[in-house]
Amino acid sequence: MAKRATVLKVTGLRRAFGPNTIFDNFNLEVRAGEAIALTGRNGAGKSTLLRCLVGADRPDEGTIEVCGHPMSETDPQVRRDVATVIDDLDFFPDLSVVEHLDLLARAHGITDPDAQVDEVLEEVQLVPQSGQLPGTLSSGQRRRLALATAFVRPRRLLILDEPEQRLDVEGVGWLSRRLQAERQQGLAIIFASHEPTLVETVATRTVTLGAPRG
Amino acid sequence: MSASDIDEIDGPELPEPPVLTPASTRELRGLMKDWRRGRATRNLGQALSDAYVAVIAALMIGAMTVNVILKAQRVVAGCDSASCLSARALLPWAAVLAAVATALAVARLFGPVLASAAEGFWLLDAPISRSRLLRARLVAALAGAFVGGALIGGLVALLTGSGGTESAVWAVATGISASAAVSAAAAQQGRERHRLSRAASFVFGFLAVVALLGVVGVAADRLTLSLSTTLGTEIGGAVAALALVVLLIGGLLAVSRLASIRRTRLVSGGSLVRGISGAFFALDIGLARDIVVQRRTMEIGHVTPRRGHGEGLQALTWREWQRLRRFPQPLVGWAGTLVVPYASEALGMSAVTPVFGALALFGAIVPMLNGLRVLTRSGGLARCLPFSMAQIKMAMVTVPAILAAVWAVLVAPAFIGVVGGVTRPFGTAALMAVATAGAGLLAAIRWTQAKGVDFSKPMVSTQAGALPPGLVTNLFRGFDVCLLATAPMLLGFSPVWSLAIEAITAIVLFNSFDADSMRARQQEAQRQLDLQKRERESQAVNAKQRKR
């Protein structure tokens, strides 16, 4: 069986805030079709690690490569390959839900943006809210919109920080199935989660950060 | 279980609730005042003596303002023709109309009667007269509008060369007019209606622009208005009297309807004030604007979705155009600023026309850059787009840039001298118009992509205490570009110098985000160099040890 291509390679990553070392000499290799779940107690460094991986935070040491390119948040190639849902996602206050997705699909040059947007909108169950402005959405609906922004565009690596947050039980079930399908289609996924069902269903490997609580 | 079943259930009888005497409004307010004073650690005198820097700054700014007024009056003294004097007589009218339009818009945004979240929770639920509780708030809103209006009216009258008494009368007239507008908005608030005040705000704004156009037309001898130039005081008095009548009627209606204002409406205005005051405390005007924009879009809530056009960067530009068509109010402001260069030239202030024009366009373009603001204030959304930051910025400013270019074409006749002022050759005038428009556009871009103050960085020691770097400079963002780019024209140099400054500014502004990554790469390269140096040093030490 042919070895799958490496999508993400992390070598010797270190991040510290003052005297507190969050992680040191962290190494990770994620191949296409692999899903890595980051687990660990609160404050273990899961979100910090993901922020470093997407370029929102800068590690003190170490290298990150995405599809063979050094990670740079401003590199259009990296932006094309990596879809992220972390806590810094913002929305245009005067664009409706469906218009956000339409804009992203068109910006990425999707051949049939309307069909793609309709499909994703249906899947995240935001059809009734398609004309609503983001400020009026509930926190759960905003989370679904954030996830939709990752699914409406092409991607080779998906980075998610606690994607189950604010989703109801049905929503977590849908997300598990969706991520599992994405992984089986060859997408590389790395996600932080506190939801055992999601981790069990989606992850091919689990990386636990930080020492367990004593 | 039916109601009749409840009657049949046996059990202990419910005790009669004790008859309590609720506290009066005055007692509750006194209690709150007492708590607040109890937490104060300094009295007003001590606070003022500590605030010497602020006092000196206020004195300096006051002195500068007086100086500007005196200078303007000397300049305006040259305006002695009948047309110029008539045009000047129109300006206080424009100030009154603009003050009323602004007061209505601000009143509608905040309430105008509002309450904080704590008051909403603790006091508005108490069994006391809500009307009495809110009366002080209404009076404060009316007083605030009066002070703001009086400042605008007085300043405009003084700057246009009116005498002391006439300026004072126009200040009072403008103040009472603004106050009357707020009272009318408060009366509407009591009935949960806002359409009338919204319509009135647009009408008065439109009339203010018409009055400014009248100023230009009269000063340029294109329009004849038989306005008295000697009865300014009497006319101002008449305006004040009329506004006072509106204020009294509006005030009485507002007071009678105070009790019927819903708590949600009162508290939402209070939370808006809290958010904005927090943003102002950090001198983050951009954040204050974000809060207002967010509030407005939440009020709108739902829109009819429109399909986008094109793909790649084109899709971004098309979407910006669609947003402008959906919310075209910024276009009204943009159209209004076309008057400014004409008015400035017509009133004989040719030297400062580029500065006024650029500042006006700067203010008009900022509301068109909401998309750029979202993409630059946090990296999340920009990260979803497969383009470099410079490409994204170019796509987002294309529509405002086209409007700035159209603005330059439309104001070029003002620089040529068609309405009076200095007559310039076509080439120079065209370049001046383009440079002025460019300054306004770039200033708006700089203002829009300003980052909030980073309180995590080391503080800078100043006379006013420790300040985070960028706290004060953030206030001048945008204005600095306006002044820097128009300075050569102001000093009488060729507008080509202004265009050169703007070209450099544009390069810096469009690459500012990529500068971060360049810095990161530079740091990384430096780290690698240090690493190599350490390795070489350690190899040298090992080699020496081997030799021994």
Image: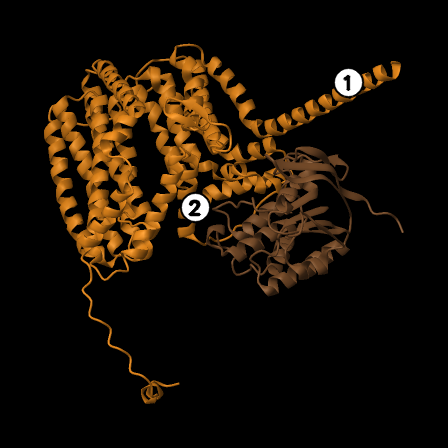
Chain colours: A brown, B orange
Do tags 2 and 1 sit on the same chain? yes
Q: Which chain carries label 2?
A: B
Residue B294 circle label: 2
Neighbours of disc 1 within 10 Å: few (<14), some (14-19), many (20+): few
Q: Which of marks 2 and 1 is nearer the N terminus?
A: 2
- Say whether residue B52 is left or right of residue B429: left
Compute the Cα span from label 2 to label 1: 58 Å
- Indicate the quadrant where residue B180 lies: top left
The residue under label 1 is B537
Q: Kindly state the secondary structure of the residue where label 1 is placed.
A: helix
- Say whether residue B36 is left or right of residue A24: left
Q: Which chain carries label 1?
A: B
Q: Nearer the viewer, mark 2 or mark 1?
A: 1
Say which quadrant the C terminus of chain B sits in.
top right
- Say whether residue A192 is left or right of residue A32: left
Where B12 sits versus A144, above or below?
Answer: below
Residue B405 visible in this rendered orientation of the protein: no
Amino acid carrying label 1: it is Glu
Q: Position of residue B258 (x, y in %)?
A: 22, 55
Amino acid carrying label 2: it is Gln
Q: Kindly state the secondary structure of the residue where label 2 is placed.
A: helix
Q: Which of A166 and A84 is in front in this view?
A: A166
Neighbours of disc 2 within 10 Å: few (<14), some (14-19), many (20+): some
Residue B273 visible in this rendered orientation of the protein: yes
Q: Position of residue B452 (x, y in %)?
A: 47, 34
Say which quadrant the N terminus of chain B sits in.
bottom left
